[in-house]
């Protein structure tokens, strides 16, 4: 039992480290987006510098593996922080190079008079994270928890500063905003939320890579060894492959989940006209859980061995799917709060498309939650419930439009019936008491 | 020795199967591009159908693994062919759905009168490959070589039909072309080369995925086991990691190679205005070798174990790099043949950019060929030569522009010197023989 607990603790630590590194990578990505909003033309030197930056970024998963395997050893966190610092430095060099060759810059900054101020501001935005990471790298040798806190600070820092200025304006009044008024063109580029196109491209990339990772797993583990086929199955490949049946089912199930979550995401962003900072954060949290889906696949593909922790595997999958989809739903609710700015008029509250979008976004949270509780109640049929859920969902999406249309007409007819009743009642009242009017 | 030969044969068979499946996937991709040139708007049903298509496509690598591990067993080739058939059928359903809802179609086809003809033509293009694959699936149980021939036919078929019509017009005359004249708008969409943007997007995707695959290898194999670190290295993670030194070097070397080949590809396509069919084919062949670079990484990362086949590993890497880069060079030479149609005026023959492009494209073929022969001659220093090559190349790219400028001025001054000599000689001649004129 003690072993089980320590395994659980290790798993929790891994998940925490995963979420933290994922979020820090997205901070680096956001800095990258800002950078190429300022620099619009790219020459050879910038292309090569950017490649160097990408090289360090692709190395980050390895440092993550080290951190996750050795949470108590300073070297993993040191290496990760140093990589983040190097990424920041390369980005700073790109900025310096860009401002040294002004024809590469954005038109508005090119013609502006306080170019130097812009340069310092963008450098501040880009180097904020790396400075914290540098401190984390130093403290990793003395006191590891502080390093983790500093790295956590990298993630919340942009949101924190925004929250503080928001509080300030609430307390002190609008004075702060007036001060910024003189730099309107500047704030348009740097303090504004990220461009919707880049958020979409990033999300599509994450979905595509996660979908690709699934097949790597299956290629590695589920191609039988020629010698084994000869000895164990008398040369019959088909028989050897039939052992992997549950793996194929798990593969297609996981792919369908990723594909459909992408589909919902895509439908949602079709109606979003501007992504606010909060929506960006929610989107990234959703993507972090999408990144956990290959784990769900690995867990559910091991049914072949009839392990007795089937239910745990299914429940973990349901939880991952639930969080990935509920954060998508949260993007939608956040968008609705400022629907005039953030949503296409077509999809605003009250329309038919609104109801349809609502149904689309609610489907996965409801189904995964339902499957979770059903497996708790009917633990004997957990595998059957899970597979049934995965098979039914695509058809549910196909039939969703029809279903929404039917329920809308039902609601409307009920509403009109009740309204007619009200009208009738009013008429009756009017008939009964004509003398009063 | 006999074992070595059979291993080599197996390896050759694997490479042949890899190239064949890669090329067939690109045929499916080309059909997909054509499809979405005809269908311009996508509704939910089409998005879901497309996802189903993608699901089967991501499953193809697994069937490839089966084919490569069991080249003599019909089941692998059967499964691959069946997947290709299913992909074709889904694409056909997408076309049928699109023509049933004409508002989703391309404007030009929407307003045209012979929509039905278009439909049949696009279906013919899409189903050509799957029909051949279907035959291959059937014959796989009777006579496997014929299946391979049929699958090979899938790749060359479009080029073959084009070649035949080209021969026909050469022999019979222009009659054939006149016949097609009435369908000009149609041929504009379907017989024309692929759109440059889609070719670029596909290539970028392949480069990005190959660069990502590298890190998966390193994450899997080079994170030490906590218990081993405790026992073998007395808990010193740094010491355990120092064992993997050569792996990191190989990782960065391979990443640099992929990154720079992408850089060359990108520079090239910046100047390409239209991609002809032959250029598309050369691009795909180049990408097929790019796909082999993770193998090169795996081979060169095993230097740690001081295996005696270091030289083979390096030579295989050089050969892969050489072919990947020489096909890029071939794209450029093919583009130059019709430079008025295919190239930006800026980069046409004779300009400074032309010389620069030439140098960029020639760098990798020259260096990889040089490294190959150097390792043959100085087999003792093969590892040093290889690593030196990988370190020097990025700097060579940075200095390339300066180098080209210097050599151009040298050439110009030599030319002008020789011209001046010619002028002087002519003047002398004119002075010597004034009476003759």
Image (cartoon, coloured by chain):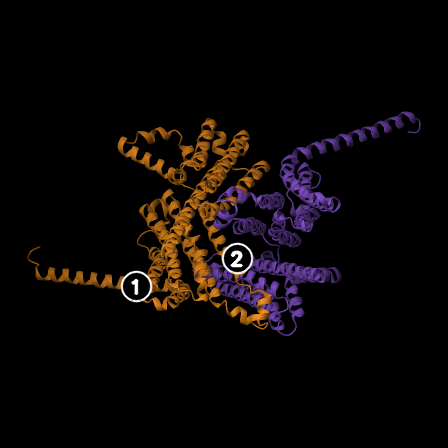
Chain colours: A purple, B orange
Label 1 Cα neighbours within 10 Å, binned few <14 / some 14-19 / many ≥20: few
- Estimate the x, y position of residue B39 in percent, counting from the top left: 51, 36
In the depicted structure, whether residue A271 falls above or below residue B245 = above
Going from N to C along the chain, the mark reached first, 2 or 1, is 2
In the rendered image of this protein, does residue B145 appear above or below residue B331? above
* Label 2–label 1 contact, CB within 8 A: no
Residue closest to the eye, A436 or B288: B288
Whether residue A111 is visible here, answered yes or no, is: no
The residue at 75%/45% (across/down) is A377
- Chain on which label 1 sits: B
Q: Residue at x 55, y 30 (%)?
A: B101
Dot 2: what SS? helix
Coordinates of residue B282 in the picture (x, y in percent) = 37, 47
| Quadrant of the image occupied by residue B397 | bottom left
Q: Residue at x 40, y 58 (%)?
A: B317
**Left or right placement of residue B351 versus residue A7 in this view:** left
Q: Quote the CA–CA distance across marks 2 and 1.
A: 47 Å
With B158 as the anchor, is B107 left or right in this view? right
Residue B171 visible within the image: yes
Tell me the tag on residue B409.
1
Q: Secondary structure at mark 1?
A: helix
Q: Quadrant of the N terminus of chain A?
A: bottom right
Quarter of the rendering occupied by the C terminus of chain A:
top right
Q: Residue furthest bottom?
A: A142
Q: Write down the residue under mark 2.
A: B216
Q: Nearer the viewer, residue A325 or B138?
A: B138
Residue at far top of view = A431
Instruction: Judge whether B315 appears above or below A376 on screen.
Output: below
Residue B56 image point, x, y percent: 53, 41
């Amino acid at each position: 039992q003690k072993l089980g607990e320590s395994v659980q603790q290790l798993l929790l630590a891994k998940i925490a480290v995963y979420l933290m590194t994922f979020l820090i990578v997205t901070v680096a990505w956001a800095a990258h987006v800002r950078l190429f909003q300022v620099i619009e033309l790219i020459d050879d030197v910038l292309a090569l510098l950017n490649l160097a930056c990408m090289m360090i970024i692709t190395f980050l998963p390895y440092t993550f593996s080290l951190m996750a395997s050795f949470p108590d050893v300073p070297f993993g966190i040191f290496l990760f922080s140093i990589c983040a610092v190097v990424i920041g430095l390369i980005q700073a060099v790109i900025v310096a190079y860009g401002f040294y060759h002004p024809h590469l810059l954005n038109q508005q900054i090119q013609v502006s008079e306080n170019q130097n101020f812009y340069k310092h501001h963008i450098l501040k935005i880009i180097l904020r994270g790396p400075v914290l990471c540098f401190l984390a790298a130093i403290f990793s040798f003395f006191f590891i928890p502080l390093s983790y806190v500093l790295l956590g600070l990298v993630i919340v820092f942009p949101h924190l500063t925004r929250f503080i200025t928001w509080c300030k304006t609430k307390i002190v009044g609008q004075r702060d905003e007036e001060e910024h008024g003189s730099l309107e063109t500047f704030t348009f580029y740097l303090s504004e939320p990220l461009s919707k196109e880049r958020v979409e491209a990033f999300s599509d990339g994450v979905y595509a890579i996660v979908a690709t990772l699934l097949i790597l797993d299956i290629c590695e583990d589920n191609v039988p060894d020629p010698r084994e086929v000869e000895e164990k199955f008398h040369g019959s490949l088909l028989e050897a492959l039939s052992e992997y049946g549950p793996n194929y089912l798990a593969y297609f199930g996981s792919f369908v989940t990723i594909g459909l979550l992408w589909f919902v995401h895509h439908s949602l962003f079709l109606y979003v006209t501007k992504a606010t900072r909060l929506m960006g954060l929610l989107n990234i949290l959703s993507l972090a859980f999408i990144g956990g889906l290959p784990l769900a696949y690995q867990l559910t593909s091991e049914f072949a061995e009839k392990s007795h922790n089937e239910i745990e595997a299914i429940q973990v999958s349901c939880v991952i799917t639930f969080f990935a989809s509920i954060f998508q739903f949260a993007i939608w609710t956040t968008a609705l709060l400022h629907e005039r700015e953030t949503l296409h008029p077509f999809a605003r509250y009250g329309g038919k498309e609104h109801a349809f979008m609502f149904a689309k976004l609610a489907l996965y949270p409801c189904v995964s939650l339902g499957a979770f509780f059903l497996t708790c109640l009917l633990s004997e049929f957990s595998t059957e419930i899970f597979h049934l859920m995965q098979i039914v969902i695509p058809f549910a999406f196909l039939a969703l439009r029809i279903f929404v249309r039917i329920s809308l007409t039902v609601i409307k007819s009920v509403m009109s019936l009740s309204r007619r009743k009200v009208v009738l009642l009013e008429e009756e009242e009017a008939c009964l008491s004509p003398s009063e009017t």
